[in-house]
Image: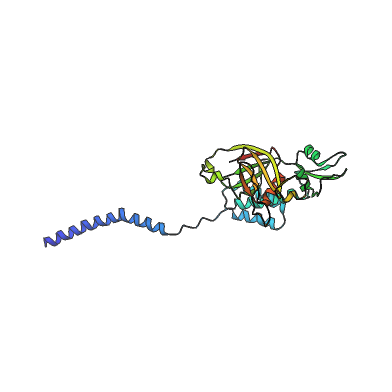
């Protein structure tokens, strides 16, 4: 009888000890292992989606001015939204379309061509560029007529090269205008330079704009300028923007500016080459 009592007590003691050992040490590890095997939980719904969709509907309905204001406010007030990048792309397309249209907006003014005016003189007088005047007014040549009405944009553009997000962002008066995706980054980055977020901001400016067509340099007055491969040469070196494209049959490869830089699709560079001018401020971050 005593032996049975002793055995029962021993079983109770060691059984309890084993249970607490399992509960305290083994079970948490098992639970953690099983938790790791589970698929990640779905992200919580984005509370900004209804607001974003409402603005998209305005754009689809052709209420462009309201959509433009809506996307601008959305970008400013919801920086963590999952729709932030799409909102920027939509706003950029609206801004670009309105900018190059013949519709008069607050950032445009009319200029009446005077005697002895030439396009370069008008550009200098209005603080813009000849290529922008030609694009804004759909000019096919550089000749102007006395009394001709020209649409002149009033801009204060600056560029931000965001290495972390691989974007070139165009600002107008410090406010978002449009963003362009970088297709090819400098070779130096691939060799193991510090992560973009750890690099200090660099201030620079547009030093020059160069266009190449069939391997030769062309100017805004030359035929085919709008379809050329463009460079936006930035100081300091190593941060210039250039056209990156796959050459067609019998076409020369696009050239890179000395010191290299960031390659963008041809249509993006063709637009940026019109929008920015020499001495446009540039921030590399």
* Front residue of 32 and 155: 155
Judging depth in this view, the residue of 6 and 79 nearest the camera is: 79
**Quarter of the figure with the N terminus:** bottom left
- Viewport quadrant of the C terminus: top right
When the figure is inspected, residue 159 is found, relative to residue 54, above or below; the finding is: above
Tell me where residue 201 appears, x and y as whole percent: 58, 38
At 31% from the left and 53% from the top, the residue drawn is 25
Q: Is residue 120 left or right of residue 11?
A: right
On the image, the x and y values in percent for residue 220 come to 76, 45
Q: Residue at x 81, y 42 (%)?
A: 119
Residue closest to the eye, 7 or 257: 257
Left or right for 72, reference 34: right
Figure label count: 0
Q: Quadrant of residue 160?
A: top right
Q: Is residue 144 left or right of residue 260?
A: right
- How is colour applied across the structure in the image? rainbow
Q: Nearer the viewer, residue 179 or 49?
A: 179
């Amino acid at each position: 009888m005593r032996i049975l009592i002793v055995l029962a007590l021993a079983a109770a003691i060691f059984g309890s000890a084993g249970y607490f050992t399992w509960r305290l040490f083994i079970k948490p590890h098992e639970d953690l292992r099983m938790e790791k095997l589970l698929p990640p939980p779905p992200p919580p719904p984005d509370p900004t989606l209804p607001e974003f969709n409402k603005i998209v509907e305005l754009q689809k309905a052709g209420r462009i001015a309201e959509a433009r204001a809506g996307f601008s406010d959305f970008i400013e007030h919801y920086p963590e939204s999952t729709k932030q990048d799409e909102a920027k792309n939509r706003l950029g397309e609206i801004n670009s379309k309105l900018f190059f249209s013949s519709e008069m907006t607050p950032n445009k003014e009319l200029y009446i061509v005077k005697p002895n005016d030439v396009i370069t003189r008008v550009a200098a007088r209005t603080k813009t560029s000849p290529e922008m005047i030609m694009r804004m007014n759909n000019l096919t040549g550089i000749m102007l007529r006395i009394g001709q009405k020209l649409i002149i944009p009033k801009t204060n553009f600056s560029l931000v090269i965001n290495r972390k997000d691989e974007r070139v962002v165009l600002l107008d008066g410090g406010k978002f205008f449009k963003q362009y995706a970088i297709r090819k980054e400098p070779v130096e980055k691939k060799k193991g330079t510090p992560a973009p977020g750890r690099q200090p901001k660099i201030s620079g400016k547009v030093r020059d704009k160069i266009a190449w067509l069939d391997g030769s340099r062309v100017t805004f007055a030359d035929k085919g300028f709008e379809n050329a491969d463009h460079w936006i040469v930035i100081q300091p070196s190593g941060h210039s923007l250039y056209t990156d494209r796959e050459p067609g049959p019998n076409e020369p490869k696009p050239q890179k500016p000395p010191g290299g830089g960031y390659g963008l699709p041809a249509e993006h560079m063709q637009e940026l080459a019109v929008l920015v001018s020499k001495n446009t401020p540039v921030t590399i971050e």
